[in-house]
Image (cartoon, grey):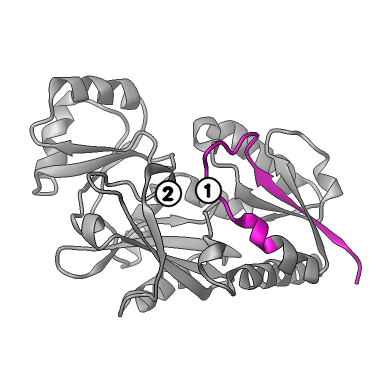
Amino acid sequence: MSKKHAAYLVMDDMGDFVTDFHLSFEPMAALGWETTTVPWRSEPDWNEFDAVYICVPWDYPQFADEFLSVLKEIDRSSALLLNDLSTVRWNLDKSYMKEVAARGDDIVPSSWYDGFAAADVAGFFTGHDVDKVVIKPTVGGNALDTFILTNPVPDDMLELLAERFTGRPFFVQPFIESIRDEGEYSLFFFNGEYSHAIVKTPKAGDFRVQEEHGAEITPTAAPEGLLDVAQRVFSHIEPLPVYGRGDWVRGPDGRFLLMELELIEPSLYLRTDSGAALRFALAFDHRFEELAGK
């Protein structure tokens, strides 16, 4: 078996981020892959790799244009970029959720803005008929610049919002209370096939579901009805992503509502399921062999 070489795109400094992508190294090796972590700004010769996996470059939202330029360079090389560039472009800006909703899939109700204006704030609440909302940038991650707002919004928060969102697109959603007690469910798919699921519950007094913010991560079976919902959402994504994660919460009426799709560099929580790393490696290798032969 000839050796294949995969670059795993990472950050220059992972800091306090929790990662487990290394669990894929052994099953990748068993399939004939040599794996190398490569900081996305390091400017290697991408032609030296057979494939490039967008692994954990989690600082990219602050440098989205630069990051996209690097991916374009990889795409022009002989290396196979996974997930592919068209998927990245689609998933980079969370306005893709409009398209998901237009397909008939249930999402957390969202209103969209091109930039902040104090005159719009009252509409954040009246538009969703609630007294508590969440505001998020359309390009972002790890809950950066994500805030809970309660009506009325105090002046110091209005000043902060003007600082963070003037001229910057964002969206507003009603705060879904179930996230605090039931949590947020994440389901993982490799080449369109369901792999595993977790539930993320924030620490007391918080709403953020990332480990870096103190959330608890628990392996789980997908609740009744959610797997069908998730499979429907992923069946609509073209081209089919090699890897992907969907995050759902239970809405007030019991329906599962999509929070977001992570198709660029999701944490795959491979450690939460004993077979997940192998399933990822098999999907990666299958897609490479499928496309390398074209």
Q: How many marks?
A: 2
Question: Horizontal placement of 1 versus 198: left or right?
Answer: right
Question: Do callouts 2 and 1 mark residues in contact (Cβ within 8 Å)?
Answer: yes
Position in image of residue 152 (x %, y %): 8, 32
Q: Which residues are magenta?
A: 1-24
Position in image of residue 60 (x %, y %): 55, 37
> What label does residue 85 carry, if any?
none
Res 11 visible: yes
Q: Quadrant of residue 169?
A: top left
As measured in the structure, the alpha-carbon distance from the residue carrying label 2 to the one carrying label 1 is 7 Å
Q: At label 1, which amino acid type do we have? A: Val
Res 294 visible: no
Location of residue 265 with respect to 192 vertically, above or below: above
Kindly identify the residue that appears in the image at 72 percent across and 40 percent down. 73
- Image quarter in which the N terminus is found: bottom right
Which residue is most to the right? Answer: 2
Question: Horizontal placement of 197 versus 157: left or right?
Answer: right
- Is tag 2's residue or tag 1's residue first in the polypeptide sequence? 1
Q: Is residue 4 magenta?
A: yes
Secondary structure, mark 1, is loop
Q: Which residue is mark 1?
A: 18
Question: Horizontal placement of 257 versus 91: left or right?
Answer: left
Q: At label 2, which amino acid type do we have? A: Glu
Secondary structure, mark 2, is helix
Q: Which residue is mark 2?
A: 211
Q: Nearer the viewer, residue 119 or 159?
A: 159
